[in-house]
Structures are given as structure tokens and as C-alpha cells.
């Protein structure tokens, strides 16, 4: 990847839109990919139970954070 704003970063950000952490995985950052995937998945799962519905907001914040992180990565 060339750096911030490169085509690779745009593709990584688009990948993160569909599956959180996938963009980081495309960029070769395995630990960051796992962290974002687990954070977003756990928060969305807790929100889906209905008991902790406010966790959906945290899941959304982490999801957007993963997209921005992939787009601004300077490898």
C-alpha cells in the first residue's frame, strides 16, 4: 500500500464497511483485524439480545472507527 488515500486504503475501507476488520486483514494487520472484528461483533451481539440494546451504539462507533482506521493507514 502506498499510503493514506491510496487505492488499497480505499478498498480496505470498503471491505470494513461490510465486515469489520476485513480491511485491516487486507492490509496485513492481523492483530488489528481480530480486535476490530471481536469488538464490533460482541457489541452487535449484545445489542441483538435486547437486554443491552445500547451496546449497538458502541458497536456502531467501533465499526466506523475500523473503517476510518483502514482508510488512514500509513503502512
Image: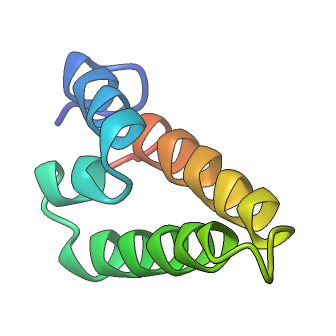
- Give the colouring mode of the picture: rainbow
Residue 7 percent coordinates (x, y): 23, 16
Instruction: Say which quarter of the image contains residue 6.
Output: top left
Residue 28 or residue 35, whichever sits in front: 35
Q: Residue at x 41, y 20 (%)?
A: 5
Q: Residue at x 36, y 42 (%)?
A: 16
Residue that lies at the very extreme toward the front in this rendered image: 50
Task: Please say if 56 is above or below 55.
Answer: above
Q: Quadrant of the N terminus?
A: top left
Task: Please say if 51 is above or below 70.
Answer: below
Question: From the viewer's perspective, is 38 left or right of 62?
Answer: left
Q: Residue at x 77, y 72 (%)?
A: 55
Task: Please say if 51 is above or below 63.
Answer: below
Residue 67 or residue 38, whichever sits in front: 38
Residue 33 percent coordinates (x, y): 30, 69
Residue 35 percent coordinates (x, y): 41, 81
Instruction: Say which quarter of the image contains residue 37.
Output: bottom left
Q: How many marks?
A: 0
Task: Please say if 15 is above or below 74.
Answer: above
Residue 72 percent coordinates (x, y): 50, 39
Residue 13 or residue 2, whichever sits in front: 13
Question: From the viewer's perspective, is 37 left or right of 67?
Answer: left
Residue that lies at the very extreme toward the right in this rendered image: 54
Amino acid at each position: 500500500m502506498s499510503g493514506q488515500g491510496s487505492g488499497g486504503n480505499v478498498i480496505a475501507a470498503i471491505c470494513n464497511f461490510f465486515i469489520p476488520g476485513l480491511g485491516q486483514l487486507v492490509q496485513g494487520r492481523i492483530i488489528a483485524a481480530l480486535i476490530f472484528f471481536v469488538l464490533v461483533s460482541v457489541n452487535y451481539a449484545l445489542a441483538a439480545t435486547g437486554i443491552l440494546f445500547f451496546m449497538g451504539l458502541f458497536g456502531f462507533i467501533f465499526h466506523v472507527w475500523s473503517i476510518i482506521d483502514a482508510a488512514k493507514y500509513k503502512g
